[in-house]
Amino acid sequence: MDKKLLDILVCPVSKAPLHYHRETNELFCAVSGLAYPIRDDIPVMLETEARRLTEEEREYLRKQARK
């Protein structure tokens, strides 16, 4: 994921910053609790295409935010 692109993208639901998760190839939003897929190197920023984060994933994001 391109760092410059990640710096300007925000969650369309909460307008909060997104975090890239390499293993799932998704952009996570800790505030809305959604994960947006990346398909063919293009983030799909539609709420209808997003999945809900698990509690473990949300906790991971909280820990990352504290660093």
Image (spheres, rainbow, N blue to C red):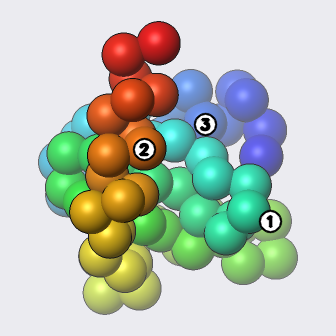
- Secondary element at tag 2: helix
Q: Earlier in the sequence, mark 1 or mark 3?
A: 3
Q: Is residue 23 left or right of residue 54?
A: right
- On residue 60, the disc is 2
Q: Which residue is mark 1?
A: 41
Horizontal and vertical percent position of residue 36: 47, 68
The amino acid type found where label 2 is placed reads Tyr
| In this view, the mark in front (2 or 3) | 2
* In the depicted structure, whether residue 61 falls above or below residue 28: above
Provide residue 25's location: percent of width, then percent of height. Answer: 70, 65
Q: Residue at x 72, y 78 (%)?
A: 39
CA gap, disc 2 and disc 3: 18 Å
Q: CA distance from mark 1 to mark 2?
A: 24 Å
| Helix, strand or loop for disc 3 | helix
Q: Is residue 28 left or right of residue 53?
A: right
Q: Amino acid at mark 3?
A: Leu
Q: For the point 70% across and 27% down, which residue is it? A: 4
Query: Is 36 in front, or is 55?
Result: 55
30 shown above or below 34 = above
**Res. 7 visible in picture:** yes
Which of the two labelled residues, at mark 2 and mark 3, occupies the earlier sequence position?
3
Look at 38% across and 78% down and name the residue there: 50
Pointer 1 with pointer 2, Cβ within 8 A: no
- Nearer to us of marks 1 and 2 is 2
Residue at coordinates 66% horizontally, 37% vertically from top-left? 5
Drawn side of residue 44 relative to residue 61, left or right: right
Q: Disc 3 marks which residue?
A: 6
At mark 1, the secondary structure is loop
First reached walking from the N terminus: tag 1 or tag 2: 1
Left or right: residue 44 versus residue 58 is right
Amino acid type of the residue tagged 1 in the rendering:
Asp
